[in-house]
Amino acid sequence: MKIELAKNYGFCFGVKRAIKIAENSAGSQDSTSATIGELIHNSLEIDRLKDNFRVKTLKNISELTDEKRAIIRTHGITKGDLERLKTTGIEVIDATCPFVTKPQNIAEKMSNEGYEIVIFGDINHPEVRGVMSYSTKPVHVVLSQEELASAKLPQKVAVISQTTKKIEEFMTIVTHLMQRVKEVRVFNTICNATEERQRSAKALAKEVAPSGINVNAVSAGYIDTPMNSHLSSDDVAEIINEIPASRLGTPADVAKAVSFLASDDASYINGQVLRVDGGWQG
């Protein structure tokens, strides 16, 4: 069997970096490390770090007990939590992705210069909550142009994006702001890892299609799994209210989508990214 690999695949730079940091944090057999929130969105990898490197996962800093080291997840934590963590005396290891640290620094710098912050992203996402906490001015978090239209904005804003959003959607927000606000500072904080992988899948699809091989991808929205256990019941209810299908996705929904794409019924579908999100763009 010949296996063709896409040009870009697997874990992105930030995830690889965080895993290596967690592995290197392992101490003696009676010494444990803990991540504040899930280090990455991969339960198998989190279990491996727990079993092989004694790295356990906590929901928040209040669950710390006798751990020797606290590891900050790739999405980061709030500025207040980080400051409180540093007063506990525990060793703090920061595995926040550098692409996430960038919007944190921008929010802090621009708000200190008098700009209110507009974030294109999901207010319930830990990355966005962390970025919000660095601003000293009001923060407006929106997922669409319609949400932005109802926001009360000053004449001086700085706009950034959740790192996993699409550049085309971000530019829609920027265009709206340019037409409405006198001074707009735009910072492209989108990480292109996801887009690169989607482009690579489409390129591979074109390459192997003449051989009768199909290459497609599934992009899942909010799926009801333990990786979202950090959200409160109110947060989850708010997300469900935003999803047109009025419910959370399940692993079975994703499995059925993959099963369909792998079936003969999808033989003429190639180079596509199938969104499994109930119509939600979160």
Image: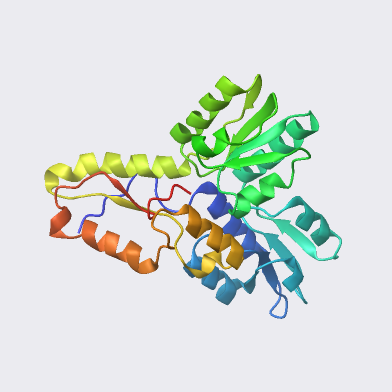
- Picture coordinates of residue 51 (x, y %)? 56, 76
Residue 259 appears anywhere in the view: yes
Looking at the figure, which quarter contains the N terminus? bottom left
- Picture coordinates of residue 282 (x, y %)? 48, 49
Residue 38 appears anywhere in the view: no
Q: Residue at x 55, y 33 (%)?
A: 149
Most distant residue in the bottom direction: 30
- Picture coordinates of residue 272 (x, y %)? 27, 45
Q: Which of the colour schemes (rainbow, by chain, secondary structure, one colour) is used?
A: rainbow
Q: Residue at x 56, y 49 (%)?
A: 14
Q: Residue at x 52, y 40 (%)?
A: 191
Q: Residue 257 appears in which quarter of the rendering?
A: bottom left
Q: Residue 272 vs residue 77: left or right? A: left
Which of 265/102 is in front?
A: 265
Which of 25/196 is in front?
A: 196
Q: Residue 258 vs residue 198: left or right? A: left
Q: Residue 8 vs residue 17: left or right? A: left
Which of 4/132 is in front?
A: 132
Vertical arrangement, residue 227 with respect to residue 181, above or below: below
Q: Residue 56 appears in which quarter of the rendering?
A: bottom right
Vertical arrangement, residue 17 with respect to residue 259, above or below: above
Q: Residue at x 23, y 56 (%)?
A: 261
- Picture coordinates of residue 206 (x, y %)? 22, 39
